[in-house]
Image (tube, rainbow, N blue to C red):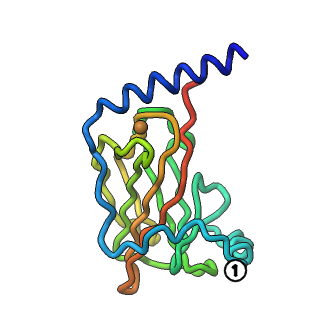
Amino acid sequence: MIRMFFVGLVVMVSLAACSKKAPTAVAAPAGAEGAATKKADPAAEKATASAKKQPASGKSAALQGKGKQFAVALHFDPKTPKVSQLFTVRTVVTTLDGKAVKPTDVAVDATMPAHGHGMMTKPQHAPRPSGAWLTEGMKLHMHGKWQFEIAVTAAGKTETIKLPFDQPPEAL
Ligand SMILES: [Cu+2]
């Protein structure tokens, strides 16, 4: 009971802190497919199964999901970033059935939709020789419900995949 009360208090305090912040929210990149992410289609399970065979997008991913054209696996470094700790994201893109894709652009952004703000940093994106993309300078400055937005351009197609991510609070 006491613990729950404490958690509630911390949430309220961080909400209050948040509402003071200017709208950093970044507009979704052009060509976005919208929120096509959450639909559970039957092919998804199959694709996940085959993705396991791909060393590139393995199960070590902190976050993974699919859009309509691409699947993404995000690997964080450090693996479990703390609130306000800078981290790097390595994004591996595949087709929906797990075949390697070499994107011409990958941009990772994160927002808190319920609070109407984004990050306070401006991450930099760069390709790696492997075909993965590295995003440096990510920082989730609050705990709670974030949404990652991964804008992928490959083979002339662009899609923005939105994935929910829960940033845990610091240990209480
Ligand atoms: Cu917030």
Position of residue 84 measured from the top left corner of the image (x, y, whole percent) = 41, 33
Position of residue 36 measured from the top left corner of the image (x, y, whole percent) = 52, 71
Residue furthest out toward the top = 2
Quadrant in the picture for the C terminus: top right
Of residues 147 and 170, which is closer to you in this image? 147
Relative to 127, say whether 74 is above or below: above
Residue furthest out toward the left = 22
Q: Identify the amino acid type marked 1.
A: Ala
Quadrant in the picture for the N terminus: top right
Of residues 19 and 37, which is closer to you in this image? 19
> Which residue is the site of mark 1?
43
Q: Quadrant of residue 131?
A: bottom left
Of residues 32 and 158, which is closer to you in this image? 32
Q: Quadrant of residue 46?
A: bottom right
Report the number of discs.
1
Quadrant location of ligand 1? top left
Q: Residues within 10 Å of mark 1 (few under 14, many from 20)?
A: few
Horizontal side, residue 88 vs residue 26: left or right? right
